[in-house]
Amino acid sequence: MNIDNTKAQMRKGILELCILSTINKKAQYSSEILNQLKASQLLVVEGTLYPLLTRLKNAELLAYRWEESKSGPPRKYFTITEKGKDTLEELTASWKTLSTAVEHLTN
Amino acid sequence: MNKTINIHLAKISFTIEELAYGVLKNYLYELNRLFDKTEGKNEIIEDIELRIAELFAEQQIRPTDAITQDDVEAVIAILGKPEELMLDEDDADPQSTKTEKHPKSLFRDPDDRYIGGVAGGLGHYLGVDSVWIRLIMILLIFSSVGGLVYILLWILVPEAKTTADKLKMKGEPINVSTIKNKIKEEIEEVGKNVKDVDYKNATNQLKTKSKELSGFLGKVFNVIFRIIVVIVGVFLIIISSLILLGVTISSLLGTLFSTLLPLEFIQFGLSTELHFFISGIAVIFTMAIPMILLFTLGLRLLSKNKAIMGKTMRLVLVGLWFLSILTLLGVAFFESKSLAITSSHTSEKNLVTPSKDTLRIMMNEEDRFENSITIFNQKTLVEDGEGKQYRLGEDVKLDLKTHNHPEVKMSIKKTGKGWTQKKAQQNAHALDYQMDYFNNQLLLNPYWKSLSKSNVIGNKITTTLFLPEGKYVQIDDNVAQYLDRGIDNDQDYYRQKIAGHLWKVENNLLVCQDCSTEDKDGFQLNMSSNRKRLKINVDEKGVNISTDSTED
């Protein structure tokens, strides 16, 4: 049994939910999302985020637009789509059920 | 002093030290490989480059400062090393990265071995548990080929010595993180890794299967199904390998046979050596290829690996098979064509015989050849005392006719077949037919000889004796099977029955002189239709009516 593997799996499942919910609050560019996730210690390394963002975008849960930046390269601003909102709702509901269940079982 | 270079990253220009550039380039290259199988790879890499540019821009105090190796390493630490990212990617899509996309190489497995690790290595390569391979090996050893195959593989297949080799052997991707894992694994459980991989595969498969068939009943059916699949697979492998073995042995024997003997000895009626050779190969292919396909099908049923034989390989084999069939059809076509044209050549001679004497016809039964080769109970090739080789043919016929000429005439008709008029003529002329005539005795040979190397089929000799009125002819018993049909005689005897009697030509008809029912003073009426014969005999004893069937 690989404990690192399990942890990574758990994180990854939750990550998509967290990304969707941060973007749902307001449109953000990648680095902003990164900072939030890192602050809440959901992300260890930034590289993990990009495949996820691409996957969510390809699944049409997210959309993005380019915006120029004064200090650096242009930024990708991510917005949530209608489909993304539906998915977020569904994921949130199932997260709540899960966390209650886990809470209940582990205590 | 460090050399610096200018690079563009996400359309922003940076000055970077050469060493740092090397590290960055290598990092991006590794990421490229890491996300190789991930959907949207280019976009991911672009995003990461964008982020690197952003981080560089943040870190750079003055735009003129060159980026150092430390800067690059700091950025890599933030974004994550390939190994750290790998963990997530691997789990995201374990099947595409592990089992399918990375081609396996054949190695001998030093960790899973009884003798040389050949079975273990083959097991990894084919994706089958090595137990199956050992079982087949043991079966093959009984047929003595297995030992040879094993030794050959032992010599030819390299041993998986390095960790990279072992990963290649199992078809796992080779990169920092898998090698790290592999080494860890080896330290932890030396020798057990084989089973682990198989276990992993098995559980993966069980997972997908049980999704399809849910519940306990589904699982039971699943297990039964699996058992049936394994039984069918083993059956297919055994049957096909036995047949393959047979084909191999017989073709080896065939080659041996044809090298010991001159090829023309065993043409089995094919007109040219090339046809014999081509059709031999085509026959082997037509038999072996379906067996090879069945064999791999059997392996596939036993194995968890879906790609035992590449699609191209399969297509090539199927193509070869059709080609072989077409070749056989082609050879058959040309063979039939090689008999298409018939040519004959007739020569005549007079036999000097006093008209009152009886002409005796016999077959020469002496075998005057020192060496002969007999195939299918037929002499096909002989050697005379001088070491000259001839083809032999036994298609010899004797016909008896009457004519209004005082002498006995004999004609010999040589018939040859061939592809072209010229070839047929050549074949006809090449026939050498001998007979002896001495002291009223005609000694015919029951065979013809030919020096021609091609075509023995369809060549024949027809000798016709033209007998004058009043001539006596004694036909010996041994001529029986060579008599042609349609020899007119007063007994209405047919072919073989004519032999063994003395005949006289009367009114252009052969009249039997020693047949038992003959009676000159009576009245005889013969009627025959098809095979039935009605005979009415009227003489001093009364009327005798008899029926019998003629034999052919």
Image: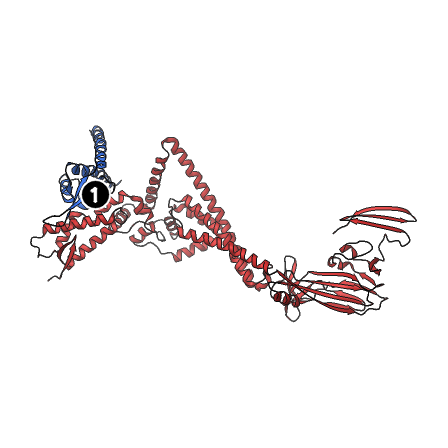
Chain colours: A blue, B red
> Is residue B252 in view from this perspective?
no
Q: Secondary structure at mark 1?
A: helix
- The front one of A86 and A20 is A86
**Position of residue B151 in the picture relative to residue B386 (left or right):** left
Which residue occupies the extreme left position in the image?
A: B62
Amino acid beneath label 1: Leu
Above or below, B386 against B221 in this view is below
**Position of residue B274 in the picture relative to residue B204 (left or right):** right
Q: Residues within 10 Å of mark 1 (few under 14, many from 20)?
A: many
Quadrant in which the N terminus of chain B is drawn: bottom left
Where residue B8 sits in the image (x, y, percent)? 16, 56
Above or below, B332 against A97 in this view is below
Where residue B204 sits in the image (x, y, percent)? 33, 40
- The front one of B198 and B438 is B438
Where residue B190 sits in the image (x, y, percent)? 30, 47
Badge 1: chain ID: A
**Position of residue B207 in the picture relative to residue B250 (left or right):** left
**Position of residue B115 in the picture relative to residue B259 (left or right):** left
Count of numbered marks: 1
Residue where numbered disc 1 is placed: A53
- The image quarter in which residue A90 lies: top left
Where residue B229 sits in the image (x, y, percent)? 43, 40
Which residue occupies the extreme right position in the image?
A: B540
- The image quarter in which residue B279 lies: bottom right
